[in-house]
Amino acid sequence: EKKVVLITGCSSGIGLSLAVRLASDPDKTFKVYATMRNLAKKERLIECVKSLHKDTLDILQMDVTSWQSILDARDRIVEKRVDILVCNAGVGLMGPLEVQSLDSMRQILEVNLFGTIQTIQAFLPGMKVRGQGHILVTGSTGGLQGLPFNEVYCASKFAIEGACESLAILLQHFNIHVSLVECGPVNTDFLVNLQKAELGDTSLQQVDDLTLNLYEKYLQHCGSVFQNAAQDTEDIVKVFLEAIQSPSPAFRYFTSGDVPPLTKLKATEPGGSRYISALSKTMFSSEEQ
Ligand code: NAD
């Protein structure tokens, strides 16, 4: 019997790659429900799976911010169960905190936090009844350590850590595993899709010069990190596969193979000062030059 997998946010990036990989499994181990908010964006996925057998992939509409949309997608699952749930949909928000509107901040939390939780809520009862299941969530370094100009994004990803860790404790009693796949920078549409304050934006006119100066440095740093150190989605998919195939999955997987050094520093010096100054140095180092 195939393992039924449902993935959110499959029109691009990590979700798309994971859906393609699982649906093209040579042993046809998986039946993949690749879901996306906007079905008009399904061409890319279809292009990637053109040669596949139809019995391993289905594409469904699902907006994680709409409970009705989640229920509609759930109703269309032929097998009437999900063995592996991958909560992957997410959006970023970048810029000085003082220019973020309440609406845009809410939107980030709607998708990243409540979207993830609602999706889990919809599939959890079925998993509990069957006494099995695996919930995987695309986590972020931004959920483990603070990043300047990403306050709200980090808040949403930290929140997911708390929600998942809490759930994992309970769900042990139901033989349901919870795993976070913690990603650093990944080459996807994430930077294009995120809401970002651009240096010339009128909204930034009210912001003080020092903040703007540091924001500019941050953007340069971010650009070079994505250019030099970003992983490809295939690397991320490998880690998801490892987690999915493990008989006793870990709670956290790090796609780079290890805990990021600065996250370690945070753990070894709980007071936080060393982490905060080390990160500031890394991000804004051109200041020292
Ligand atoms: P991406 O922008 O290519 O993919 C995100 C997907 O989520 C998109 O397909 C988007 O349409 C979808 N989405 C947004 N709002 C949605 C909604 N309301 N309902 C359903 N789907 C929605 O970027 P990605 O890098 O593949 O992002 C996937 C996940 O990885 C996100 O949760 C992101 O936070 C996380 N992540 C990404 C990076 C990175 O550097 N790319 C790093 C760490 C974590």
Image: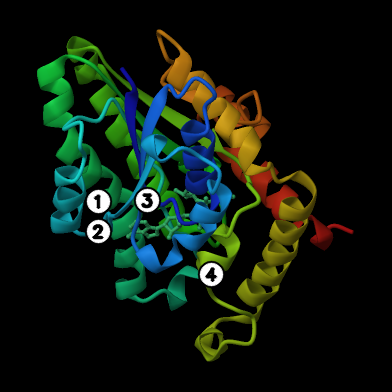
Q: Nearer the viewer, residue 258 or 37?
A: 37
* Distance from Cα at disc 2 to Cα at disc 3: 14 Å
Q: Is residue 266 above or below residue 47?
A: above
Contact, CB < 8 Å: mark 2 with mark 3?
Answer: no
Image coordinates of residue 194 in percent, x first then y, are 51, 65
* Distance from Cα at disc 1 to Cα at disc 3: 9 Å
The residue under label 2 is: 65
Query: Given this view, does label 2 or label 4 mark the residue nearer the observer?
Result: 2
Horizontal relation, residue 124 to residue 212: left or right:
left
Q: Of the residues under marks 3 and 4, which one precedes in the sequence?
A: 4
Callout 4 environment at 10 Å: few (<14), some (14 to 19), or many (20+)? many
Image coordinates of residue 241 in percent, x first then y, are 51, 24
Horizontal relation, residue 188 to residue 250: left or right:
right
- Confirm if mark 2 falls within 8 A of ligand 1: yes
Residue in the image at 40% along x and 68% along y: 40
Residue in the image at 47% along x and 40% along y: 19
Q: Amino acid at mark 3?
A: Ser
Contact, CB < 8 Å: mark 1 with mark 2?
Answer: yes
Q: Of the residues under marks 1 and 2, which one precedes in the sequence?
A: 2
Q: Of the residues under marks 4 and 1, which one precedes in the sequence?
A: 4
Callout 3 environment at 10 Å: few (<14), some (14 to 19), or many (20+)? many
Q: Of the residues under marks 2 and 4, which one precedes in the sequence?
A: 2
